[in-house]
Every structure is written in structure tokens, then in C-alpha cells.
Image: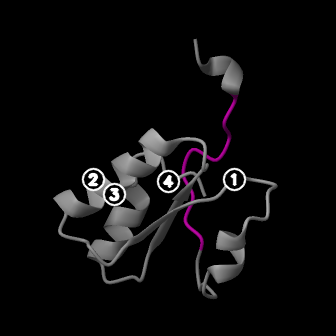
């Protein structure tokens, strides 16, 4: 959730993990950046989907079971965006 620049997911995928990157559905630019990061690193198998905290869209129920969730910058405060 909240892939941002995709760094954690890109590193995991380069190490051989099966990765799904997510970020809020309303941040289409961020999701597009995730796609570009994957392409730039020859990681066409990485899934990128829009998920928003607290909302249960159909995409949530399509996710496969996972062994690990990687997170970075988990404490987001919108007041910091000026």
C-alpha cells in the first residue's frame, strides 16, 4: 500500500519476489510512475494496482495471499505537503 517511488517493491522483485505494487486509486500519476519504474528495471511481471486505505474495491478481493507486506514512509501526514 502506498508504493510511492516503488523502491522497496523494485528491490524485492529484483531479488526474485512476486511483487504487487499498490497506491491510492486517485493518484494516477503515482501509479503511472510505478509502471515506469518497473519497465525501467525490466520487471514486466510486477503488478501495479490502485488501492485506497479503508475502501474495499473489487481489486482487494482479487489479490493473492502474501507472505510479506513491505512498507516505507508509513506515517504520512498531509499537513507536510505545502
**Crowd around label 1: few <14 · some 14–19 · many ≥20 (10 Å):** some
Q: Secondary structure at mark 3?
A: helix
Query: Label 1 near label 3: C-beta < 8 Å?
Result: no
Query: Label 3 near label 4: C-beta < 8 Å?
Result: no
Q: Quadrant of residue 30?
A: top left
Majority secondary structure of the magenta segment?
A: loop
Whether residue 4 sits left or right of residue 36 in the image: it is right
Q: Earlier in the sequence, mark 4 or mark 2?
A: 4
The residue shown at (33%, 66%) is 11
Residue identified by numbered label 3? 35
Q: CA distance from mark 1 to mark 2?
A: 20 Å
Q: CA distance from mark 1 to mark 4?
A: 12 Å
Q: Secondary structure at mark 4?
A: loop
Q: Earlier in the sequence, mark 1 or mark 2?
A: 2
Residue identified by numbered label 4? 3
The residue shown at (27%, 53%) is 36
**Crowd around label 2: few <14 · some 14–19 · many ≥20 (10 Å):** some
* 74 inside magenta stretch: yes
**Crowd around label 3: few <14 · some 14–19 · many ≥20 (10 Å):** some
Q: Earlier in the sequence, mark 1 or mark 4?
A: 4
The residue shown at (79%, 57%) is 55
Residue identified by numbered label 1? 52
Residue identified by numbered label 2? 36
Return the x and y of residue 29 as percentages of the image width and height: 43, 40
Q: Earlier in the sequence, mark 4 or mark 3?
A: 4
Q: Secondary structure at mark 2?
A: helix
- Numbered disc in front, either 4 or 2: 2
Query: Label 2 near label 1: C-beta < 8 Å?
Result: no
Amino acid at each position: 500500500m502506498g508504493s510511492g517511488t516503488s523502491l522497496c517493491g523494485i528491490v524485492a522483485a529484483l531479488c526474485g519476489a512476486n511483487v504487487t505494487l499498490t497506491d491510492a486509486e486517485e493518484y494516477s500519476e503515482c501509479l503511472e510512475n510505478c509502471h515506469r519504474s518497473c519497465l525501467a528495471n525490466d520487471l514486466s511481471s510486477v503488478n501495479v494496482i490502485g488501492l485506497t486505505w479503508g475502501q474495499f474495491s473489487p481489486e482487494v478481493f482479487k489479490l493473492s495471499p502474501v507472505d510479506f507486506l513491505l512498507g516505507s514512509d508509513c506515517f504520512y501526514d498531509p499537513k507536510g505537503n505545502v
